[in-house]
Amino acid sequence: MTDETTQLAPAGPSHPLAEAGSLGREMGRAYRREVEHHRKEMRLEEADAWARGPSGGDLARVDEAPPDQLDWWSLGRAAELDPARGRAAWERCLAEARAELGSGHRAAKAVDAAGTPWERAQFLAILEAFVADWRPRGGVEAALVEALAQAYSTQLAWTARLTVLGGAEARRQDREVEQGGYWVPPRVEAAAAVDQAAAMVDRFNRLFTRTLRALRDLRRYAPSVTVGHVDQLNLAQAQVNIAPAESTPERRVGAPLEAIAWEGANHAHEG
């Protein structure tokens, strides 16, 4: 016997202890949906046997499917047939999700209208400029900078719409004055469309300003303390020995997802 007690690490958001229950519930729900679906054509025992039956195709699907196309049922089957491969598939999902977030593509998808490469590049250019100005420190500041870019990008889109609608109405009025010698007020539908576009421009401008103020206040009330070239620091009666910290990967807007995922994996392995 020993008096030593095993200390478990805190279960953070991405810690296996914290997410095991949530992942298991999602997989269980997917299994029940699959059984209910096949119960329409077979008995309960047969549907259960079919859902639990071994299939090499399930493992191949988990190994080959892109993370955004992986479903809970396939991941659950992989967890039963080969837990290591199921866990590897989930870790791959997490790695690519972090890479998508860090590169700015997650924020870009929220404001993509047509989803074209040019539209994505335009948003990332705005985000890159804002990141260069603010150099966000941590996830909260990064989220606020992304919200800035989203508000400004959407404001530009509504400004373009307002220009089109207002310009078309102005040209119509010019033609009527030139041809008939009098002016006809715009139709209710046309005036409402112009007013809506103008209101949306103002709304996203206010959202941009409010987010900018929140980012400014966050910096003002939570200032950073930078200490350089010091081996020992005394803070409130305590001695703190400071060792040089290893550099961490910087946020790189628009960087290739594979490069960010690989760099993040290296730092996770070193830690």
Image (cartoon, rainbow, N blue to C red):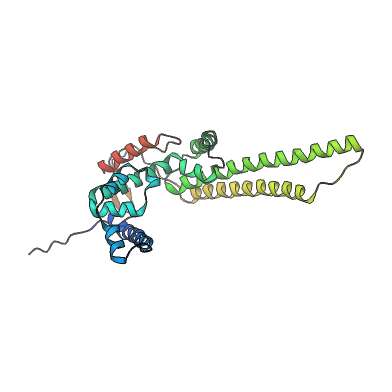
User: Seen from this angle, which residue lies furthest left?
Assistant: 1
User: Seen from this angle, which residue lies furthest right?
Assistant: 181
Residue 239 rendering spot, x and y as whole percentages: 28, 49
Residue 82 rendering spot, x and y as whole percentages: 23, 50
Q: Residue at x 72, y 48 (%)?
A: 193
**Position of 85 compared to 36: left or right?**
left
Q: Residue at x 13, y 61 (%)?
A: 4
Q: Nearer the viewer, residue 67 or 245?
A: 67
Q: Nearer the viewer, residue 200 or 109?
A: 109
Query: Looking at the image, is 168 positioned above or below residue 73?
Result: above
Q: Nearer the viewer, residue 154 or 231?
A: 154
Q: Can residue 244 be seen in this snapshot? A: no
Residue 78 rendering spot, x and y as whole percentages: 27, 51
Q: Quadrant of the C terminus?
A: top left
Q: Nearer the viewer, residue 265 or 38?
A: 38
Q: Quadrant of residue 241?
A: top left
